[in-house]
Image (cartoon, rainbow, N blue to C red):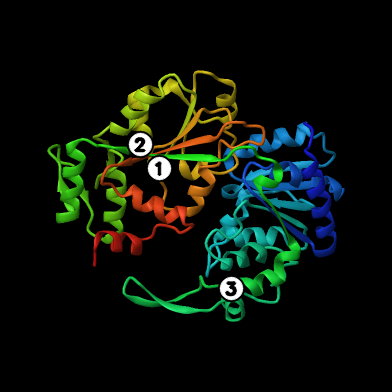
Amino acid sequence: MQPRPYQIDIANRAADIIRRHGLVYLAMQVRTGKTATALLTAENLSQKKVLFVTKKKVIDGILADHKALNLSFEIAVTNYEQLHNLQYLPDLIIVDEAHCLGQYPRPAKKVKILKALCKGKPIIYLSGTPTPESYSQLFHQLHISSFSPFKDYVNFYKWAQDYVDIRLKYFKGLKVNDYSNANQTKIKAMTDHLIIPFTQEEAGFKQDVEEITIGITMQPSTYYLTDKLKKDRIFYGKDGNVVLADTGAALMSKLHQCFSGTVIDEKQEGLVFDRSKAYWIKDHFKDKKIAIFYKYKAEEIMLYLTFGYDKFTSDPAEFAKSDSKWFLSQIQSGREGINLSTADALIMLNIDFSAVSYWQARARMQNKDREEASKVYWLFAEGGIEENIYKAVKDKKDYTLSYFKNDYGIE
C-alpha cells in the first residue's frame, strides 16, 4: 500500500499539531483516505500502542490498512459499543467518525467512557463532517481530551453561556433552551489551529455524485393504508394486525415505513405488503453490480423475499471481489467507512431522517481513481413522505417532528 503524497503531508502536519497541542482533528471529506492518514500520523509520533475506535463494519479494513502500511506500532481496533469492555491501555487514541460524539446538551454515554480512557493521552479525531448541524457539536467531541481548548469548562451548559446564543423553543408543548445557535466565529478562533480540513477536490477526485430521484407508483393498498392512518390514526387489518399512529411521532414513523411497502404492527411484527420498490430494482438492475441501503428491518425481509438470501452480502470486501453478489446494509450501519466503489450504482430503498446519513451514505461509491460519476438512485413513493425528508437532509437539516407537522398540517 503506497500512501498518496497528500496523506504523507497531512500526517506530518498532524503530528506537529499533536506535539504542540495534544490533539488534532482530521476533517477530511469521505473517501479521501482518513484512516491511512491517521495511521501514518501515529507512526510519525513513534507510538508503541494505538487504539482505533470506529464502527463495527470497518474494523477489518483498518487492520488490513495497518498491515499493508507495514507500521511499527501495535494496534487494537474496537467499536463504540464495546468500549466498556476494553482492557487495552494505549499510548494514543484515534477516534473515527468523531461527530457521533457531538450530542448536546447532555453527553452520550460513550463520551464519558472515552473521557476516562483518553485522560492525558494524545488523540487523533477523524470525520468528514465534524459539525453537520451546529458548532455546538464540537464541545463534547473535544471534551474527551485532557488538552481540549475548552478544558476549563466543566460541562456543556457552562460552555454554552460563553459560546452559544441560547434561545427558547417549544418542544412537546414545553419551553426549552435551544443550544444550536453557536457562535461559529468565536469557536473557530479557539479550534482552527487543531483542525486540518481536506476536500475531495484537493485530493484530485475526477467525478462527483449523480443523484437520480425515482417516483414509484405504489399499490393501491399503500395509499389506502396511509390515508387511513392520517385520518383515523389506527388501522385494523383482516388478519388481526393493528397499526397504531396515535401520536405525531408515531404517525411520522408509520407513514415513513408504509411508503416503502412495509410496516411494524402493534405486535412488533414486520409486515411486507407492497413490493413495488423491490420490483423496480429487479426490472432496472437485473444484470448490474449494485449496493442497496434500506432503513427498516422489514425492508430487508422484503428484499430477501424478492431476490433470495444468496443474492446479497453485507461484507464490503466480498462485494468488491464478487460479480454476482449485491451489497445490502441498513443505512445507519453502512453509511460510514465502507468502500463500495466497485458498484455500478447505489440504490436507496428508503431515506433516513438524519442529514449525516444522507451526506455520508451517498458518498460510499466515491473513489479518487473512479472516472465515471457515482450514481445514487433514491426510490420515493409517489405522494409519499420521502421527498420532504430529502429536501431537509440535502439542506443539512435533520427531518424532525416539527417539519413533519408543518408538511402535513398536524397540530
Instruction: Name the quadrant of the N terminus.
Output: top right
Residue placed at 21% from the left, 40% from the top?
222
Label 3 sits on what residue type? Phe
Q: Are marks 2 and 1 in contact (CB under 8 Å)?
A: yes
Residue placed at 53% from the left, 28% from the top?
343
Q: Position of residue 246 (x, y in %)?
A: 22, 58
Q: Is residue 371 above or below residue 170?
A: above
Label 1 sits on what residue type? Lys
Q: Is residue 232 above or below residue 317?
A: below
Q: Nearer the viewer, residue 357 or 151?
A: 357
Crowd band around label 3 with a 10 angstrom C-alpha radius: few (<14), some (14–19), many (20+): many
Q: CA distance from mark 2 to mark 3?
A: 39 Å
Nearer-N-terminus badge (3/1): 3
Q: Looking at the image, can residue 269 be seen?
A: no
Residue placed at 75% from the left, 67% from the top?
147
Q: CA distance from mark 3 to mark 1?
A: 32 Å
Q: Looking at the image, can residue 332 be seen?
A: yes
State left or right for residue 81 relative to residue 225.
Answer: right
Q: CA distance from mark 2 to mark 1?
A: 7 Å
Q: Position of residue 80 (x, y in %)?
A: 59, 50
Residue 295's disc number: 1
Nearer-N-terminus badge (2/3): 3
Q: Position of residue 53 (x, y in %)?
A: 66, 48
Crowd band around label 2 with a 10 angstrom C-alpha radius: few (<14), some (14–19), many (20+): many
Instruction: Name the quadrant of the C terminus.
Output: bottom left
Label 2 sits on what residue type? Glu
Residue 33's disc number: none
Secondary structure beneath label 3: helix
Residue position for label 2 = 299
Residue position for label 3 = 156
Secondary structure beneath label 1: loop
